[in-house]
Image (cartoon, rainbow, N blue to C red):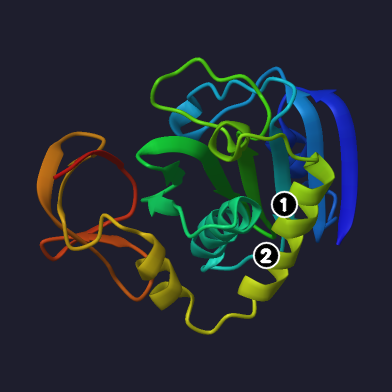
């Protein structure tokens, strides 16, 4: 996989989109800092130096969101030498309830993008967030994080039981959750179907935010 490294960018996903539109794929774009980093629904992702900000440009795959979530979760676990992370559907990776990474997948006609932000050695001021450095009590080389991320991605893209592996890492499954949709808020028991969609008491959810787990 080709790796393109930048100092400061607006957003790695924006660069990924430009390259994908030109037919380039199997690329990982990495930046030391983003000035227009974003998450789902155009939320701001603060992207200070010390974190990992990266975007994959890939062939289209319906299982990409599951693979990327697992990839980031396993990368965090390996770096911390502990099965400590968990996936919060659809795009957050948590440690002890605090966000350590976020994911933004975007699909286009001929390619997909998976944007990743991991709090590594960067400063975070939110009580609801943490970093790998805080959890380990030591700093990490970003090159090691990138290498581990790519290794896990390549392994998981060939994993036949992605949904089952995702379910193991998504600790909210089987619990009652509250989900905010575009026009309503619903609650019920959370499950994941075979296509990777969130199921709330039999209702399939393709987009939304889990705002509470009980």
Q: Residue placed at 64% from the left, 80% from the top?
A: 158
Q: Residue placed at 37% from the left, 42% from the top?
A: 96
Mark 1 or mark 2: whose residue is earlier in sequence: 1
Mark 2 falls on what kind of element? helix
Is residue 20 something that shows in the picture? Answer: no
Q: Residue placed at 67% from the left, 65% from the top?
A: 152
Pick whichever, 169 or 80, lies toward us: 80
Q: Within the image, what quadrant is residue 2 found in?
A: bottom right
Bin the neighbour count of mark 2 within 10 Å (Cα to Cα): few under 14, some 14-19, many 20 and up. many
Q: Which mark is residue 56?
A: 1
Pick whichever, 38 or 141, lies toward us: 141
Pick whichever, 179 or 102, lies toward us: 102
Task: Say if 116 sits above or below 162 in the image.
Answer: above
Of all residues, the one furthest to the bottom in this rendering is 160
Q: Residue placed at 70% from the left, 17% from the top?
A: 35
In front of the other: label 1 or label 2?
2
**Quadrant of the image containing the N terminus:** bottom right
Mark 1 falls on what kind of element? strand
Give percent across and percent down for residue 9.
79, 24
The count of marks equals 2
Q: Are marks 1 and 2 in contact (CB under 8 Å)?
A: yes
Task: Say if 1 sits above or below 22 in the image.
Answer: below
Q: Which mark is residue 153?
A: 2
Bin the neighbour count of mark 1 within 10 Å (Cα to Cα): few under 14, some 14-19, many 20 and up. many
């Amino acid at each position: 996989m080709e790796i393109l490294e930048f100092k400061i960018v607006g957003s790695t996903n924006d660069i990924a989109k430009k390259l994908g539109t030109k037919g380039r794929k199997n690329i990982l774009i990495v930046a030391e800092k983003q000035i227009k980093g974003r998450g789902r629904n155009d939320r701001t992702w603060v992207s200070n130096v010390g974190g990992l900000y990266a975007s994959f440009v890939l062939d289209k795959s319906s299982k990409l969101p599951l693979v990327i979530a697992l990839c980031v979760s396993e990368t965090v676990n390996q770096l911390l030498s502990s099965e400590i992370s968990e996936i919060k559907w659809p795009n957050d990776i948590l440690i002890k309830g605090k966000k350590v990474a976020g994911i933004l997948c975007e699909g286009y006609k001929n390619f997909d993008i998976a944007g990743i932000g991991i709090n590594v050695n960067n400063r975070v001021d939110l009580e609801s967030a943490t970093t790998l450095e805080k959890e380990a009590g030591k700093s990490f080389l970003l090159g090691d994080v990138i290498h581990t991320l790519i290794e896990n991605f390549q392994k998981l893209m060939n994993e036949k039981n992605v949904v089952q592996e995702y379910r193991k890492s998504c600790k909210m499954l089987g619990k009652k959750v509250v989900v905010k949709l575009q026009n309503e808020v619903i609650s019920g028991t959370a499950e994941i179907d075979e296509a990777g969609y969130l199921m709330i008491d039999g209702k399939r959810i393709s987009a939304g935010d889990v705002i509470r787990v009980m």
